[in-house]
Image (spheres, rainbow, N blue to C red):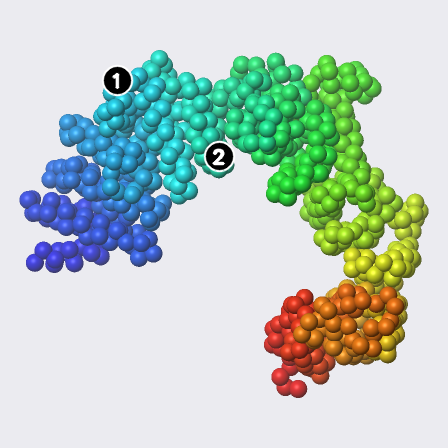
Amino acid sequence: MENDPLQEVAELLANPVQVAKWLEAQTPGSQKSHASALFDLLVNEAAQPKSVSGQACVRLCGLVEQSSKSMSEELRTWAFSRDVTLELFNFFIDWNESDHHRSMKLVLDLIVQFIKRNPDKDDASTTKAYLLDALISIVIGRSAKPVAKSAIKTLDHFLSKGVFTLKDIHANYVSHRQELAQSDDIEVWRMFMVDLLHWMRLHFVCPTSGRFIVCVYRGWRHADYAKPTAPSLESWYQWLLDFLTEEPSLLESIKNYIFLPLFKADRVEGLRFLAKMNGDKVVSTASNLDMDIPALLQLAVLETGKKVGLVEEPGLDEDEANAEGCSSIMVHEKILESVLAHPSHEVRVLALSLLVTSPSTTRPYSYAALELLRKHLATVFADPDAKFRVEVSGKVRDMFRRVRGAIHVLKRSIPRARAKAQKANLPGAQSKVNPDLAAAEQPILYRANLIVLPEAQLTHCLEYHEEFLRWYIGFLCSELTPTASYQRHIASLKAVMFITRLEAEALKIWETEDDQRLFFDLFDDKWSRALFDLLMDPFDDVRDISASALKRFYADERYRRFALTNHTSDRCTAETLAEVSRRAEELARRTSRADHSDGSSRVSQLLYRFLGSGQEQVALLSKLISELERKTSVAESDLGRAVLEAPLHGDFASLNHVWQVASELEISESDIGAVHELQSTLVSCCERVWKAVRDVLCDDSPEGHLPQELEDLEGLDTKNLLSFSFRAVHESSNLMRTIVLAIRNQSRDGFISPPRDLFERIGNLTFNQLSNLRHRGAFTTVAMTFATCCQQTKHLDQGE
């Protein structure tokens, strides 16, 4: 019959106050049994995944808390009993590990309350000792329960709430580690830290372990703890260094889960720790290529401190910036100077991050910081390690964004500073001041609001930021010289693409009236020549990014000086591109190199995009297709002569790139019919070329096959013939794939799209090629085209 009252009160479980009143209304002697039954019911319900249990954990805590405040002595005694506290503790330890959610923290808060408010102090002390013993045994690995995350979190919570003290933890830890009974306190704490750091190897325990380490460290530094027995800052740092030497991969974890919480929670202690790390003798000067752990850890500390605003860049008077009681410290310039040229990539990335990053994207740089960047950016861009360049590219993007933001803030601040000086009637507010003297006599304190600084200082700061921006744009251009390495090319091109994308955003925060002079006019004929030269680069990604950059520059009228000539009134885009296209085609014809043909095709794509009218675009298409038909006829009549005099791959590549743009742009009604005819002609050329070269590529041994009628042709060998045949099929198949992809435009008026019969012709041709090809490279390309045909059939109008 005990189930009846439980069923009766089941509807009241959502309201703990009503449940407590119901329990108080029961006959004395039965209240405890009813409360225990309800408690067990809610524990079983809460011991389910969150998606199933719902608010059972909240109701469980509400039941026990209201019982502890009940008017009934029986209910209060039951709520404060050791059994209830241990049951809640075990529930949290077991379920927080696998199903952590916000309401689980209520259980810990409730245990803290019961231990502190328990009227029976002896019982509370016994319970506290039991809990501490259980938690320490889990942390040091003596317990069979795999619940380290929950145990460390509970220790952290109890220590921060004052349930446990560091002396309690020390004593209990020694009781578990009998071998430390004769050791001093420093050694005991060292071993305890080693056990905690051990758990940072597990990614799901790492954040919790890091927070508890910070909590213990702050406890050592607290005034209430006996100073002679507390480990020093140097000792704690050495323990971290020893651990990192064994596990170098955990540097990011130590940064994010130990240093960052420490600096955010305790600014004073953070400044003290950072001041120690800022010593110029701390950084290792290892000259080998091995990982320099001391330097890495020191830079990680300083970088984390800078993210939270505790570290400043070099440039201020160091004695003043590092004075006792100052709100931040100044990193020594000689530290950065040594580590920016360090042989270890990891150290250099951290050093660059320390120099570049800031909590604010509009915070001005110091003059010394920009000088360091000027000195070391060249070696960073030229580094052969791709992973290092990727990491650095993110820092360089942050640098540019911050420089532009700082210029914007400085320009806005100067008029305000001038007006304030005039209002205060300060003589000399408008006077000219030697920038060098201004920098030397009155260091610019960037921690303060820029508006309150004197106008001369703001002007000097603005000048060297603008000068650095001009230098940086010029530096990127110098990295694009044709004789520079691939690493310098690709790093500079990626930086330019980021800059142009950022400047094209409508919502950028740093736009000023002087942007035309300050930024856009920096891209002149030198830039134009450098990017056009890179269209013929041997590396495909360099050619691709160069073409994309050219498209952006020519599409934005603000880059008015971006031209091959110095005329700023009219860039003559179409005429320039036509001349460049002619030269590129001539170079590709002379060399027959694949990279030159690809570069020529990209120029043709740019020319088509920037032609003034649709008629001119159709005329360009007609010209390219007519030349392709001529060469195809040569291949059909005399394949050997075509190999030596009329290569096809460049023409197919040009039409492929041009057709990509043609399918993106809207075509007028008067021109759409002509473009459809040209599209059909293109597919016919692909079919004819396949018939001309199929005997070469479909031979069981294409590498050594030379048709009998071509054996006597002077200058022709199997290598040339196979290369001609493969490239022709490869590029023609790429062109057909571009045509097929345009079928997505079928429902859009004014856009080119292949009709059903043309789509079927391409599908049949590619299937025929797949069934006969014996050349692996050609087979791979054709297979991609055939797969595209199969994927795009969903766009076909089934009603036709």
Expressed as whole percent of the image width and height from the top left, the position of residue 92 reads: 27, 43
Q: Would you call the spot at circle 1 few (<14 residues within 10 Å), some (14-19), or many (20 or more)? A: few
Mark 1 or mark 2: name the one nearer the start of the chain.
1
Question: Is 569 left, or right, of 150 in this rendering?
Answer: right
For the point 24% across and 47% down, the residue is: 60
Asked whether the residues under the numbered discs 1 and 2 touch, taking CB atoms below 8 Å apart as contact, a structural biologist would say no
Please state which amino acid type lies under the numbered disc 2.
Answer: Pro
Residue under pointer 1: 182
Residue under pointer 2: 248
Q: Specify the quadrant that holds the C terminus.
A: bottom right
524, above or below 726, in the image? above
Expressed as whole percent of the image width and height from the top left, the position of residue 322 reads: 58, 17
Q: Quadrant of residue 261?
A: top left
For the point 47% across and 36% down, the residue is: 250
As rendered, which of 637 and 717 lies closer to the eye? 717
As rendered, which of 770 and 665 lies closer to the eye? 770
121, above or below 226, in the image? below
For the point 53% across and 14% down, the residue is: 324
Expressed as whole percent of the image width and height from the top left, the position of residue 709 reads: 83, 77
Q: Secondary structure at mark 2?
A: helix
Question: Is 729 left, or right, of 391 in this rendering?
Answer: right
